Amino acid sequence: MIDPFGRRITYLRISVTDRCDFRCVYCMAEDMTFLPKRDLLTLEELDRLASAFVAKGVRRLRLTGGEPLVRRNVMSLFQSLSRHIDSGALDELTLTTNGSQLHRFASELADCGVKRINVSLDTLDPVKFREITRWGDLNRVLAGIDAAQAAGLRIKLNAVALKGFNDAEIPEMMRWAHDRGMELTLIETMPLGEIDEDRTDRYLPLTEVRRSLEESFTLTDVPFRTGGPARYVDVAETGGRLGFITPMTHNFCESCNRVRVTCTGTLFMCLGQEDAVDLRAALRASSDDDLLREAIDGAIARKPKGHDFVIDRATKRPSVSRHMSMTGG
Ligand code: SAM
Ligand code: SF4
C-alpha cells in the first residue's frame, strides 16, 4: 500500500474497544458514554480486518483502545493474530495499555508472540496517579509492569507531559524507567475530543522539557526512527533512551507510515483529520474480503498529507472532535 505522497503504509493500529477502566483527565470526560456493543466489530471481524491489512503489506500491528485488555476475550484475538507472527507475515504484534490488567495477561501475551508493549504512565506518585486517571490504582499498574518484565516483554513507557502536573517529576521518572531497562517517551497533549477541562492550561511544549533536562543530563540525538512521530535521544547519565512525541511543535507527517481503525471499523487515514472510510459496512456486506480490500485501497489513495492541530486560547474547540480513546493512541 503506497499513498499519493509515496509513503508506504506498513503499520496499523486498531482500537478494539472505546471502553476503559480509567478516566484520564486529558483523554475522557468522567461521564463518557460508550458505544452500544452492536456497533463494535466482533473479535472475528477484527481478525478479518487485521488479516486483510496484513495481506496488503502491513508488517506491524498494534491493538489499542480505550483499554484493549478490558475487552472481553481479547486474548483470543491475540491468539488468532499470532498466526501472522508465526508465518512471518507480521514483524510485530503489540499493544498500548494502561497496565491495569497486565498482571493477569502478561504471560499469555508473551505466549502469543508479543515481544514489546507500551504502557502509559504519567506519574509515579500514587495520589497524583489517582488524580490524573480519576479511577486508577498505581500499585496495580506497577505489579503489571513487574509481571510483564518477568514474562520477558520489553516495555516502553509513555507519559503525557502536563504542565504543573508531572513536569518536575520527569527526571525522576526517566531515571526509574532507565534503571529498569525501559525506554520512556514523552507525549504532548493533543486536541482530541471534548474533555472536562481547558487543555491550554496543561499544554507543555516538549521543547521546554528538553531544555530543562539538558541542564542536568547530556542528551544526544539518535537517528533511530520507527516511521512514527517519536524522535529519540540517548541519555549519557542513565544509559537509556528518551523519546519525544511532538505533534504540536514539530510536524512529523512526511514520514507517516500508518493508518488507524476504530473499534467500529472506521478507518482514519490521519489521526488529525476527519476524513474516514467505513470498513464495517464492507466487512458485513459479504463474507469474502473483496469489498473490504477495495475499501482499503480507496482509503489509502485518499490519505492526506498531514494534520493541522492547534492548541491556543482562541481555539476553544478541539481540532478533532473524536476522542483519542476512539481512534486509538
Ligand atoms: N488505554 C490505553 C493507554 O492508556 O495506554 C490505550 C489507549 S490511550 C488513548 C493511548 C495513549 O494516548 C496513552 O498513552 C494516552 O496517554 C494517550 N492520550 C490520550 N489522550 C491524549 C491526548 N489528548 N493527547 C495526547 N495523548 C493522549
Ligand atoms: Fe483510558 Fe488510556 Fe484514555 Fe487513560 S488514556 S482514559 S487509560 S484510554
Image (cartoon, rainbow, N blue to C red):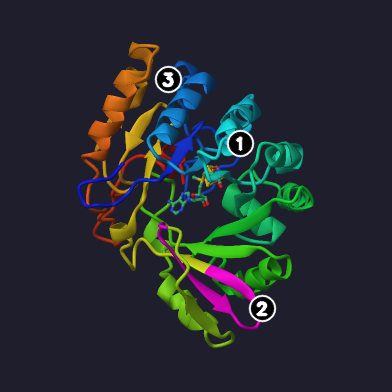
| Front tag of 2 and 1 | 1
Helix, strand or loop under label 2 = loop
Cα gap from disc 3 to disc 2, whole angstroms: 47 Å
Magenta stretch bounds: 227-242
Quick check: which quadrant has ligand 2?
top right
| Front tag of 3 and 2 | 2
**Mark earlier in primary sequence (3, 1):** 3
**Mark earlier in primary sequence (2, 1):** 1
Q: Is residue 34 above or below residue 206?
A: above
Q: Residue 86: horizontal and vertical position, in percent?
A: 61, 36
Which residue is drawn at the image coordinates 54% and 22% (left, top)? Answer: 43
Q: Amino acid at mark 1?
A: Asp
Quarter of the rendering occupied by the N terminus: top left
Q: Circle 2 sits on which residue?
A: 238
Q: Amino acid at mark 2?
A: Thr
Q: Amino acid at mark 3?
A: Asp
Indicate the quadrant where residue 200 lies: bottom left
Q: Circle 3 sits on which residue?
A: 39
Residue 92 in view of the camera: yes
Q: Residue 173: horizontal and vertical position, in percent?
A: 65, 68
Q: Circle 1 sits on which residue?
A: 86
| Front tag of 3 and 1 | 1
